[in-house]
């Protein structure tokens, strides 16, 4: 039967292969290093922003380096301890039958008990898998942050366009009131009120432009670009028709959420730690060999083997004497495993809460957007058209006209905000499940 020790040189390569294959399997399930490349973004500009962030964001690069460093621990912990080379020089030469001992050269190697190196490799492998999942989780965080900033920017650009249209409409009203005043059909007070409303719109545009600068800076920071890099205006983003199935969303989160996958890997690592702690009850083995240089006797009748050098081999074992230390090691590993299991439960609860919360928010926002598009905006537009006709014939005053105009403005701005919030909720829901949504 082949001894397990004869296979020790192969263990580092085999365990590294385990890490790579485990990461590849996780990637196929939506949790590997390539999984973050799949995300919902039908807008080309958003795709460019996310791809740039995934490539250059410093936080992502930090986690990638940590993931690589974790993988490199596998060959370290699965290698044998360094052999020890000793050289001894006799100060007072011991005399033997065949001559004096001059010096000794010895080498020794400690061999951990069967299975210790393999268990250490398994623990390092699970640590590497967890680190890889946390790297992808950081990618998902950045994707969600980019989307939030992008959709907020889409709202600001929409609000700017709406406000500019409003100002053009007010300019038209000002000309109309000026004409009515010049012909004696209107009052100068009406002209002043409209001009005051134009001033409010101009102030609102200044505020929106400042908000745009802040959001552009945020986007550029996420993409690791200079903060003043220009970002073109964002066109109106199309709203997807999403079917919310809580059961399916929970399943996606259970299967793909990177923090859950990392927690599972850490549980596996801790369980292997218990097995390793139990191995400490068994001794490690040390083997060695030594070569002793012998100076032969210079006599007329030398003894047999005069001056023949000595070659010896040795085998030793450590003595696991302090049993309390080993019991404490097993108990410590057991408590760590319990802690990792509780951590998994906590992460699982957080995932379920995030999925439920964002799904409910998404459904509410969808209803509000439909209300704005199907009811409120058509009603406000019809009310403004009616008031305009009445104003032109002198049936209503300028205050009624401005009130109708403000209602339409607020409804349009509210609709733009609701649409942006819906897209942000969709991005947060995608982050909650840890994979592309909608698929």
Image: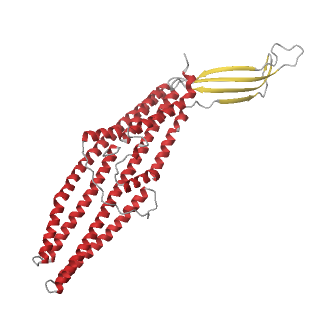
- The figure's colour scheme reads secondary structure
Q: Residue furthest left?
A: 395
Looking at the image, residue 162 lies above or below residue 322: below
Query: Relative to the observer, which residue lies in front, 164 or 58?
Result: 164
Looking at the image, residue 164 lies above or below residue 78: below
Q: Tell me where residue 151 sits by quadrant.
A: bottom left
Residue 438 in percent (x, y) is at: 30, 46
Residue 384 in view here: yes
Residue 323 in percent (x, y) is at: 49, 25
Q: Tell me where residue 308 sits by quadrant.
A: top right
Q: Residue at x 28, y 40 (%)?
A: 250
340 displayed left or right of 311: left
Quadrant the C terminus occupies: top left
Looking at the image, residue 208 lies above or below residue 47: below
Q: Residue at x 41, y 48 (%)?
A: 139
Q: Tell me where residue 228 sits by quadrant.
A: bottom left
Quadrant the N terminus occupies: top right
Q: Residue furthest right?
A: 300
Residue 328 in view here: no
Q: How many marks?
A: 0
Residue 168 in percent (x, y) is at: 26, 73
Residue 435 in percent (x, y) is at: 35, 43
Query: Relative to the observer, which residue lies in front, 124 or 339?
Result: 124
370 displayed left or right of 24: left
Q: Residue at x 46, y 34 (%)?
A: 21
Q: Residue at x 21, y 65 (%)?
A: 410
């Amino acid at each position: 039967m082949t001894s397990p020790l004869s296979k020790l040189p192969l263990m580092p390569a085999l365990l590294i292969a385990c890490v790579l294959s485990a990461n590849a399997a996780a990637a196929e399930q939506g949790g590997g290093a390539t999984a973050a490349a799949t995300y919902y973004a039908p807008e080309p500009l958003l795709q460019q922003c996310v791809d740039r962030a995934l490539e250059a964001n410093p936080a992502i690069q930090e986690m990638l380096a940590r993931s690589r460093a974790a993988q490199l621990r596998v060959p370290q912990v699965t290698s044998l301890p360094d052999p020890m080379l000793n050289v001894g020089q006799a100060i007072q030469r011991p005399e033997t039958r065949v001559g004096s001992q001059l010096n000794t050269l010895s080498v020794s190697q400690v061999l951990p008990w069967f299975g210790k190196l393999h268990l250490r490799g398994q623990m390092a492998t699970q640590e590497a898998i967890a680190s890889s999942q946390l790297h992808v989780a950081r990618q998902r965080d950045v994707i969600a942050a980019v989307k939030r900033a992008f959709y907020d920017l889409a709202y600001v650009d929409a609000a700017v366009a709406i406000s500019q249209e409003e100002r053009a409409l007010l300019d038209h009203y000002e000309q109309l009131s000026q004409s009515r005043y010049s012909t004696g059909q209107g009052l100068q007070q009406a002209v002043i009120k409209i001009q005051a409303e134009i001033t409010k719109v101009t102030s609102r545009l200044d505020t929106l432009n400042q908000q745009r600068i802040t959001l552009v800076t945020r986007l550029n920071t996420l993409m690791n670009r200079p903060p003043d890099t220009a970002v073109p205006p964002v066109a109106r983003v199309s709203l997807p028709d999403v079917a919310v199935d809580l059961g399916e969303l929970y399943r996606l989160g259970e299967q793909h959420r990177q923090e859950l996958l990392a927690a599972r890997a850490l549980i596996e690592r801790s369980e292997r730690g218990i097995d390793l702690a139990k191995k400490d009850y068994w001794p490690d083995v040390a083997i060695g060999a030594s070569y002793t240089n012998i100076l032969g006797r210079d006599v007329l009748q030398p003894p047999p083997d005069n001056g023949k050098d000595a070659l010896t081999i040795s085998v030793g074992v450590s003595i696991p004497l302090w049993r309390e230390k080993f019991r404490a090691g097993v108990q410590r590993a057991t408590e760590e495993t319990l802690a990792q299991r509780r951590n998994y439960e906590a992460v699982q609860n957080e995932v379920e809460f995030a999925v439920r919360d964002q799904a409910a928010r998404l459904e509410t926002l969808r209803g509000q957007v439909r209300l704005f598009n199907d009811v409120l905006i058509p009603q406000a537009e019809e009310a403004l058209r009616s008031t305009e006709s009445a104003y032109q014939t002198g049936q209503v005053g300028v205050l009624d006209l401005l009130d109708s105009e403000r209602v339409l403005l607020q409804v349009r701005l509210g609709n733009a905000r609701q649409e942006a919030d819906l897209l942000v909720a969709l991005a947060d829901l995608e982050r909650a499940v840890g994979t592309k949504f909608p698929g």
